[in-house]
Structure formats: structure tokens, C-alpha cells
Amino acid sequence: MILYFSATGNTRYIAEELARLLGDEVLDLCPRIKAQNYETIYSEKPFVLCAPTYVCAPPAFFIRYIEAIELSGNPDVYFVSTSGGYSGISGAVMGRIIRKKRLHYMGWAEFKMPPNYIANKPHHLPEESVIRERIDQASQDAATVAEAIRARQTLKARHIWLLEHLIEAPLHPVLSRMGHRVDGFLASDHCISCGICARNCPLNIIQMQDGKPVWRGTTCAHCMACIQNCPVEAIEFGNITQGRKRYRLKEYL
Ligand SMILES: Cc1cc2nc3c(=O)[nH]c(=O)nc-3n(C[C@H](O)[C@H](O)[C@H](O)COP(=O)(O)O)c2cc1C
Ligand code: SF4
Ligand code: SF4
């Protein structure tokens, strides 16, 4: 079974491609994460866990969720990351968690996708042709990865250097807890009160009040599901996102 979280569609696309190629089921973990549903997930076929990269590792809430649930049936677990180009220590982090659950870690595959971190100052969405090239390349890579999974081979991603572990392992939890402030998010008067942002938020940070979204608390995962999927582009993050093109993979298919 293919399990995934995706905010803007990159990881969903890879997960659904793998499911199609393997003739396997695919499960979006977001509703379960939102509902804090920790029921055991059973699969006869190997598990394939798919997640984006947030600051060189999988999202902290995804890690916590995988740590908390029981995966039963087939003991083989693959990991797939998507990123804007650099998945950091993602494979090492997930490998450790999977082994700790006494399951067989079957390796890691990285997919380089269009970057989606629009609320980050250095973010730059590439030209449309580059976006399409990346998606095409990812589709080809998915076929190779699916072939290896079908043959029950271990996936071999690149080597993670000691320096990457030393810098990124402490950086990821600190930035995940403190770095992603919510006070920059605001919905403009263009908001049509559809509630999509609140429904998509994996952490239930957004509440609809008098028909408008309100961001609660001080930090969130900065997954970008709210700002990127608003149908009328009513959400901004301070002045960083003003005038920036929104990104959703499905618009390039
Ligand atoms: C908070 C945040 C942090 C990110 N950090 C990285 C990173 O460290 N390296 C990278 O290459 N891409 C990074 N990205 C880009 C995403 O990993 C990438 O676009 C991913 O494919 C998005 O997946 P999704 O469309 O399934 O949500 C980051 C995105 C966000 C929102
Ligand atoms: S997704 Fe956009 S339009 Fe819909 S409620 Fe949220 S801010 Fe308003
Ligand atoms: S508030 Fe927006 S960016 Fe933050 S976790 Fe929720 S959907 Fe993601």
C-alpha cells in the first residue's frame, strides 16, 4: 500500500503513479493526521511511505504520525521523498524510524519536483518548461522505482555525507518547531468563504470564523496547502507572496 502526505500535489502524483504501476492501493494520510486517527494500517504488499521534504527531512508531523501508527501485514517498507531538488537526510531519518518499528527498511527514492515553498523569501518557481521537464522526468523515474519495488529490490538513493547529518539533524527539529510562524498568513477580501484552506490544513491550524479563515497558534508546518490551494488566491504570507505565482501540480498535467 502506498501512503502519502502532499500539500501541493507533487507527492500525491508520485504516490498515485506508483500505485498505478504496481496495481496497489493508495492512501492519503492527511485526513487521518487531521483526525488524529491512529488505527493500524494493514497491507499485504510492501508499504511505500511518500512525503515531501521540509528543511532537509520529512515533515515533523509526518514523522510523528508514522512513529505512532502500527503498520501490519507485509514487513517491508520503502520510503519516497519529493523535494525542490535536495531531500537532505530524509532517507536516513525514515530508515531509523522504520527499523525502530522492527520493520524492514527497503531503501529510499528521491524525486526532484517543482519547489512549492512560496512563503520563503529565496523561493523561486521555475519557468513552466522546467516544471514540465521535472514532472516528465519524475514520471520516468517512477516507472524505474516501481519496477524495483515489484522485484522487491532495495532502493539505492545517494550517499548522505557525515557533514549533512551533523548540520541537518539538529536543524530540522528546531526549524520545524520555531521557524514556521503563522502570523504572516492573512486572507484578503477576495476570500469566498469556501473553507478549502481549513479543510486542507493537516494540523487544524485554520478555523473558519464568520466565513473567514483565522490562523490559530504561533507556528505551523508551513506545508503551503492553504496558500497554494486557495481557488481565488486570497491568502498571502506578509508581502513575501504578493505577486508570486501559485503552484499546484495538477495544473500542469
Ligand atoms: C516548509 C518547506 C520546506 C521545504 N524544504 C525543502 C528542502 O529542504 N529542500 C528542497 O529541495 N525542497 C524543499 N521544499 C520543497 C518541497 O519539498 C517540494 O516542493 C515538495 O515536492 C512539495 O511536495 P507536495 O507538493 O507533495 O506538498 C520545502 C517546502 C516547504 C513547504
Ligand atoms: S481557501 Fe481561500 S477562498 Fe476559500 S476560505 Fe480559504 S481563503 Fe477563503
Ligand atoms: S496553516 Fe497552512 S501552511 Fe500551516 S500547516 Fe496549515 S495548511 Fe499548512
Image: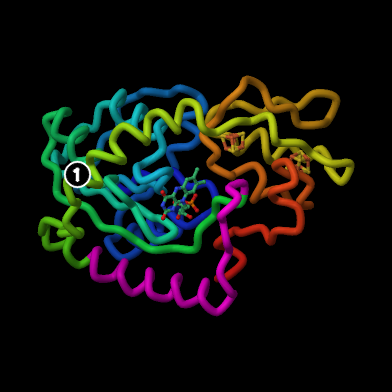
Residue 133 x %, y %: 46, 77
Q: Position of residue 103 (x, y in %)?
A: 13, 35
Q: Is residue 70 above or below residue 10?
A: above
In the image, what residue type sits under mark 1? Val
Q: Which residue is at the front of the view, 147 or 215? A: 215
When asked about the image quadrant of residue 154, the answer is bottom left
Disc 1, ligand 1: is the CB inside 8 Å? no
Q: Is residue 100 left or right of residue 194?
A: left
Query: Does the stretch in magenta take in 206?
Result: no
Q: Quadrant of the C terminus?
A: bottom right
Image-based side of 195 in relation to 142, left or right: right
Residue shown at 31%/23% (left/top)?
68
**Which SS does the magenta portion mostly show?**
helix
The stretch drawn in magenta includes residue 122: yes
Image point (50%, 27%), residue name: 178
Please name the residue shown 27% across and 61% down the image: 22
Q: Could you say where residue 248 lies in the image, as x and y percent from the top left?
A: 59, 58
- The residue positioned 60% from the left and 31% from the top of the image is 181
Image position, residue 7 (x, y; %): 53, 46
**Which quadrant of the structure image shows residue 60?**
top left
Tell me the element at label 1.
Answer: strand
Q: Is residue 210 above or below residue 223?
A: above
| Disc 1: which residue | 77
Seen from the viewer's position, the closer of residues 183 and 83 is: 183
Q: Which residues are magenta?
A: 119-146
